[in-house]
Image (cartoon, rainbow, N blue to C red):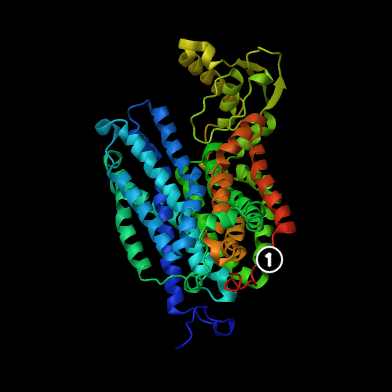
């Protein structure tokens, strides 16, 4: 009887990619693209979701609950990693990521069919949030399955190159969701899109699901898992083995703090916070900002594959850590340059028109609000939130206890108010305060929006592309590194949890953390200390504790 062959091709046979290997990469990557497409729709269509599923409450509260649903998808990703990582190590890679894809696709399709609040009342928002939770759980299992499956099919010396295609899928999924939405807006009237057209991107997911499942059904199980299963050496309790034994748990901790935490903040800063900064901080037109981000992503996306390929030559560790270090060293000058390129009037106003907030420090909260559900009502919080939202730098001056906070712009002093103490007059006082403060900052030269005629689009694209290149450095090789860190018995579980804690929590809550730091300190760039500190910490921890993995034989480490 012939000996059963499990191993991918040896290095001597590596030259061209085989048809089977190409099929593995395409099937795994395409499925992941569709999952990211589904996941991002809720964020891209937040206003429409709020108007339909949360119409029973006031518009502000409705939008807050919509954001809560979006945040819930990030928050549960590590739990999905535990559930589906364990399943992947028990029953196999192929069947597990078929399950995750099916859950994601069906949850998205249900959102497209879900009746609004006007039809079924409170069931509508509850069902929407349940769908978001299911999507987050499914995404927590998808990435680990796709990366593990591709890596376990790859030739020994090309794992970085093969798995780097998986790393392009989040960007491609975001692109796909935006293209579908923009296309529908282009061909439909605003009224028709608001009434029913916004549901079409969700409903399309059922066709994407069908294509993805059909493609993945043609695949065989991963050779590494099949070998382990046939030999009867697979783990019967992968979670206990992965995180209940110190020798494996310490690998997960190093993978998180010395790899995925830094990767996550660089990834979210370069692709998501950069867009937030353009639209909310330097007041660029949203359509133009999206085009600028899209242009930088088009230029930068091929570098995911390039750095994955390069990591097969020089190692995963130096590329990932170099990306973290470069980001940490250059974020401050890059974002300052972005302000000058987009909105030179804002840059000039910050330099010539100092603003101070005088307040009782005990009244000032750290305005971290990842779900949008917290309420900051003190006079200090009201004043600081206004200035932070309008991108006004300010100095903090401590006042005696009980002092009502005030804003000083030049020689003009504007008194804030406490929303709770104002009682029934809160709305009127908010209107008066906002009008007075807005008039004050406009008189001081702070613009309401960036002037397109003064925007240097070439420099904007250059700066954004540099930040995207950092993203490709840290993200391109990370899948191969995570796969190589863990033995086959617990690989799916072991790599999924640190990846999704890093990206779901360290990265997913980056924008609200940055805003809270900006509001507390009074400097629009101070929030960058968060990604800088995490990226620098990852560089140090990774440099000391992270092993180089590119030469590991993942079949031999069972």
Residue at 30 percent across and 58 percent down: it is 207
Q: Is residue 47 left or right of residue 311?
A: left
Residue at 59 percent across and 45 percent down: it is 506
Q: Is residue 255 left or right of residue 108?
A: right
480 or 188, which lies in front? 480
Query: Is the residue 167 above or below the residue 338 in the image?
Result: below
Q: Can residue 387 be seen here? A: yes
Classed neighbour count for the residue bearing mark 1: other residues with Cα under 10 Å, few (<14), some (14–19), many (≥20): some
Residue at 64 percent across and 65 percent down: it is 316
Residue at 70 percent across and 49 percent down: it is 537
Query: Is the residue 464 above or below the residue 433 in the image?
Result: below
Position of residue 64 measured from the top left corner of the image (x, y, whole percent): 44, 32
Disc tally is: 1
Position of residue 115 measured from the top left corner of the image (x, y, whole percent): 27, 38
178 or 73, which lies in front? 73
* Quadrant occupied by the C terminus: bottom right
Q: Secondary structure at mark 1?
A: loop
The quarter of the picture where residue 384 lies is top right
Query: Is the residue 34 above or below the residue 413 in the image?
Result: below
Position of residue 52 measured from the top left corner of the image (x, y, whole percent): 32, 35
Position of residue 544 measured from the top left corner of the image (x, y, whole percent): 75, 57
Q: Can residue 410 be seen here? A: no
Q: Which residue is mark 1?
A: 548
* Quadrant occupied by the N terminus: bottom left
User: Which residue is outermost to the left?
Assistant: 119
């Amino acid at each position: 009887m012939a000996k059963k062959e499990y191993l991918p091709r040896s290095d001597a046979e590596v030259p061209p990619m085989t048809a089977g290997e190409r099929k593995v990469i395409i099937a795994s990557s395409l499925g992941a693209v569709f999952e990211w497409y589904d996941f991002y729709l809720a964020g891209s269509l937040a206003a429409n979701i709020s108007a339909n599923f949360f119409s029973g409450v006031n518009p502000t509260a409705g939008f807050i609950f919509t954001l809560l649903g979006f945040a819930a998808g990030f928050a549960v990703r590590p739990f999905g990693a535990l559930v589906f990582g364990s399943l992947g190590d028990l029953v196999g890679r192929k069947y597990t990521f078929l399950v995750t894809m099916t859950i994601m696709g069906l949850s998205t399709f249900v959102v497209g069919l879900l009746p609004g609040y006007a039809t079924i009342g409170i069931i509508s928002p509850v069902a929407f949030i349940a769908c978001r939770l299911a999507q987050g759980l499914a995404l927590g299992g998808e990435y680990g399955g796709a990366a593990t499956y591709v890596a376990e099919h790859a030739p020994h010396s090309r794992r970085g190159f093969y798995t780097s295609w998986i790393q392009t899928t989040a960007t491609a999924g975001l692109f796909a969701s935006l293209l579908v939405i923009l296309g529908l807006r282009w061909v439909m009237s605003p009224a028709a899109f608001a009434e029913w057209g916004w549901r079409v991107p969700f409903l399309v997911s059922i066709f994407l699901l069908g294509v993805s499942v059909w493609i993945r059904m043609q695949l065989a199980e991963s050779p590494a898992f099949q070998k382990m299963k046939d030999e009867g050496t697979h783990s019967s309790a992968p979670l206990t083995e992965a995180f209940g034994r110190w020798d494996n748990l310490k690998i997960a901790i190093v993978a998180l703090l010395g790899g995925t935490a830094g990767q996550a903040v660089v990834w979210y800063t370069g692709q998501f916070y950069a867009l937030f900064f353009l639209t909310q901080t330097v007041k660029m037109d949203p359509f133009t900002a999206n085009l600028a981000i899209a242009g930088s992503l088009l230029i930068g996306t091929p570098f995911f594959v390039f750095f994955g390929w390069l990591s097969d030559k020089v190692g995963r560790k130096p590329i990932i850590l170099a990306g973290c270090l470069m980001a940490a060293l250059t974020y401050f000058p890059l974002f300052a340059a972005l302000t000058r390129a987009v909105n030179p009037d804002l840059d000039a106003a910050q330099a010539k028109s100092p603003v101070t907030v005088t307040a009782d420090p005990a009244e000032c909260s750290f305005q971290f609000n990842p779900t949008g559900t917290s309420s900051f009502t003190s006079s200090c919080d009201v004043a600081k939130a206004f200035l932070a939202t309008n991108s006004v730098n300010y100095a903090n001056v401590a006042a005696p206890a009980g002092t009502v906070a005030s804003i000083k712009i030049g020689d003009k002093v504007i008194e804030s108010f406490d929303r709770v103490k104002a009682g029934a007059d809160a709305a009127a006082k908010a209107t008066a305060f906002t009008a007075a403060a807005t008039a004050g900052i406009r008189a001081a030269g702070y613009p309401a929006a960036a002037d397109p005629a003064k925007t240097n689009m070439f420099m904007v694209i250059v700066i954004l592309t540099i930040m995207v290149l950092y993203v490709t450095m840290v993200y391109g090789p990370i899948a191969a590194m995570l796969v190589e860190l863990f033995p086959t018995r617990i690989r799916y579980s072991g790599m999924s949890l640190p990846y999704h804690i890093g990206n779901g929590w360290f990265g997913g809550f980056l924008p609200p953390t940055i805003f809270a730091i900006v509001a507390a300190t009074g400097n629009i760039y101070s929030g960058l200390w968060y990604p800088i500190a995490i990226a620098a910490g990852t560089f140090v921890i990774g440099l000391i504790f992270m092993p180089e993995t590119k030469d590991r034989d993942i079949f031999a480490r069972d």
